[in-house]
Amino acid sequence: MSASGTIEGAAGREPHAPEATLGRKPDYLHAESTLRSWFLTTDHKRIAILYLISITGFFVIGALAAGVVRLALVVPNGAIMANDTYNKAFTIHGVVMVWFFLIPSIPATFGNFLIPLMIGAKDLAFPKLNLTSWYVFMTGALFTLASVVLGGVDTGWTFYAPLSTAFSNTWVLPALIGVTIVGFSSILTGLNFVVTIHTMRAPGMTWFKLPIFVWTHYATSLIFLLATPVITTALILLIAERGFHVGVFDPAYGGDPVLFQHLFWFYSHPAVYIMVLPGMGVISEIVPAFARKKLFGYRFVAYASIGLASVTFFVWGHHMFVNGQSDLASLVFSSLSFAVAVPSAVKVYNWTATIHKGSLRLDTPMLYAMGYIGLFVLGGLTGLYLATLAINQHVHATYFVVAHFHYIMVGGTVLAFLGGLHFWWPKFTGRMYSEPWGRVSAVLIFLGFNVTFFPQFILGYLGMPRRYATYPPEFQLLNVLSSAGATILAAGYIFPMLYLVYSLWFGRKAAANPWDAKGLEWETSSPPPTLNFVSPPEVPRVPYDYPIQAQESSDQHR
Amino acid sequence: MTPDHPALQLWPVAASATAVETDQLILAFTVLTLVLTVPVFLAITWFALRYREGSDANREPSGIRSNLIEISWMLVPFLLTLVFFAWGARLFVDSRNPPPDSMVIEAVGRQWMWKFQHPTGQAEINDLHLPIGQPIKMHIISQDVIHALYLPAVRMQVAALPDRYTEMWFKADKVGTFHLYCSEYCGTDHSVMGGKVTFMNPGDYQDWLVHAGAEQGKVAAGRALYQAYGCAACHEPGSPVGAPGLAGLYGSRVRLADGRTVVADNGWLRQKILNPNGDRLAGGGKQVMPSFAGLIPEDELGRLIDFIKAYPGPGQSAEATR
Ligand code: HEM
Ligand SMILES: [Cu+2]
Ligand SMILES: [Cu+2]
């Protein structure tokens, strides 16, 4: 596929649909069935499916690596595998989960599929660019997988110099090149979303009628555009130093190793909001739909998304409190990190208020959403613990940090991903999955997750450092507990893969709007036709037009 | 398992006033966390039961001004948490400014060991002995990649950077032996880069210094022999002969060319020095080591072995030395 340089005009573009089928109006899945029609598609929905399949593959690879890590930690003395093997396993786990699953997870799949539907458009602004971004993503993935096949990488997903540039004897270069390339696919996706949301909204779809899902993706796209170039630059400098001994970070060549940490976290802290904002968008759709009630504090939630995307650029130094950063810088970064918690808390309180006096249905997506809220709150608050300077100098780089970010990224983002997957599965595929299995898996995942990760808070406070292939024997009990939880969690992940795939052939046919939800994506058939809507959809008077309306002075006076 | 088994200990020992206050800080913060979250969790559970579809709950809007609610749930928790920002910041800044009468310990990190030097010159590897009641300032640097020195008993860690000094200070107040770790991932043997820190009464510390001085005298004598007999020319890292490094050899398991594995204890080392052509190493290169049988008197052999013993290295494995 040659890179698509042609930037198509946003208005009135028709993604190619086979003329012959006009009479029956087949849905996007059945419009054409050749492999070619999938691999050269410019339909945002098909590209979303390509992404969905790819990232599921990466999730499986990342999860297998996690399994290896948890297996190794069952014994304290490293008897199960060599230290190098362990180090490679956690590096692969981190690299794959962060760059090949979490970052693209919700935006590239649900965002791609739903943004045009939600704003009443036929496609994204740049359909060819959209396809290009998938190819760029897969190219990056190929390099990274090559590094794994060739023998692995052992630097950790953070690639700190000079370990990564001078000391590691593993396949660092292909991994770095892969991650650098993937950044470009993020940039292309972000650009596409921003332009689409600005220019392709249906007549009458004003900014404050947009679903929160679109708001959070807008905020995420801004981070994609503003932060990704920084990590790209930093990674290219790493490549130059490792490959050509250009001294940037390694003091042996006159470089500064802490400089890399600054560049890395200047991207990677905002990137945690790339991972978390889209999930907040998903939850903001699910909660009103299953509470049958308008989202509480719509405008506050919308502004909070933009607020998060802005403040998140000014807290990166909280990863470096004990890394030789000046005390003044630490004080500033610590206080700003406390400020980030405000917009996060706004969201949680508003979701809770939405449930108040609603008419609740506890179907699978709602179970995930409620699990999300619980785990996200714990993850966010322990983030505040970490931002507290005196606590940080004890628990930095221990299992406490591991627990913190897993509560947010696995407890949060992955639950939101699964919740969204179940919520929109009928829309994506036209099929219903088995509801009892859905509920069982949701509960299993919630329990398994907590058994796996809660003990790690204790381990961290007890002082077990992270990235340890061997550890003092007194920590074994909690580690075995954590590994046991991981097996429950694994079962919880395997079930949805089975029953969702099963539903593709044997599931009940889904109605256009099986949840009786609001939002333009439910106004079209399940699955939608290639051009999304048969006739232009009518934009409702207010967003989240559910039967139960909250009393909201903020929205009614404007 | 008895109730005081270390595996059942869910709270780390606090061996300094800063550690005690750090614990108070996190416990108090946890109380606030519970105050802020338990109501939310209870509310969600209660709403989920009360407002289930079909229940006859009252769903009339309550008529509360939502802007007011929004502002209050933004500001109140924020201001409450700021208390903890301030407390944490104060404690942190205090724990960053060492008192002028601190005793200075030089700490050097390298893949994968810590080397500490006391003001009186005694050096230790991976383990560290310190007096209580005396402010200690660690002056830290790395020889290669970034490491971090972490002493959980005093709730403190600081990175060891390759290009500049960092500092950490604390005043231990509890006698005991605690973990000493590297907490910044630094490659293969990151998890074995560490040992124990022992806090002792000042008198015991003085005794320890004297004893360590004597021990180190013995080792120094061994080192002199190691130079004198030419072992260093072949065995020091970077020698053109490419003989295996001896750091970390003592007590490690050595794979032999004939497939056996032996433990490098006193007896085996003695044999290997006297008769290097026996027990050839697995994967070894050309055997060029001369036999020292009849050349080194028994007492000097003992001192050479003492020296090898005091030369612990990366992960204690012979293959991993560079
Ligand atoms: C209330 C908001 C949050 C605050 C105040 C916060 C604070 C922190 C702090 C201070 C650290 C550094 C800990 C250390 O290494 O010493 C940290 C680590 C981390 N946080 Fe958060 N965090 C927040 C939300 C998030 C979110 C939303 C995510 C992800 C979606 C996230 C993911 C991570 C990750 C991945 C790390 C560890 C990175 C590494 O060292 O590998 N955090 N957080
Ligand atoms: Cu951060
Ligand atoms: Cu280390």
Image (tube, grey):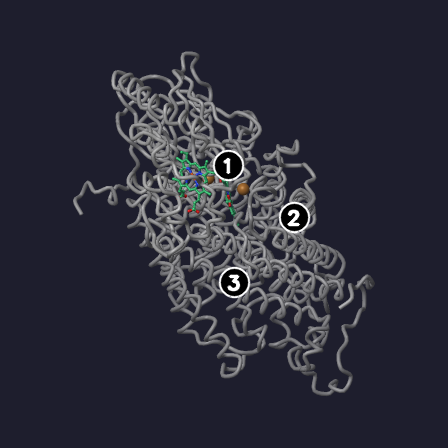
Q: Which circle marks residue A59 in the picture?
A: 3
- Secondary element under disc 1, as helix, strand or loop, is loop
Rendered location of residue B214, percent (x, y)? 31, 20
Q: Which circle marks residue A215 in the picture?
A: none
Chain identifier of the residue bearing label 1 in the image: B
- Secondary element under disc 3, as helix, strand or loop, is helix
Mark with earlier residue (3, 2): 3
Q: Is residue B73 visible?
A: no
Rendered location of residue A422, percent (x, y)? 50, 69
Residue at the spot 49% in from the left edge and 48% down from the top edge: B285
Residue labelled with disc 2: A223
Chain identifier of the residue bearing label 2 in the image: A
Frontmost residue, B291 versus B227: B291
Which mark is nearer the camera, 2 or 1?
1
Q: Which circle marks residue B237 in the picture?
A: 1
Chain identifier of the residue bearing label 3 in the image: A
Tell me: is circle 2 under 8 Å from ligand 1: no
Classed neighbour count for the residue bearing mark 3: other residues with Cα under 10 Å, few (<14), some (14–19), many (≥20): many
Residue at the spot 53% in from the left edge and 67% down from the top edge: A421
Frontmost residue, A385 versus B245: B245
Residue at the spot 50% in from the left edge and 56% down from the top edge: A93
Residue at the spot 41% in from the left edge and 38% down from the top edge: B193
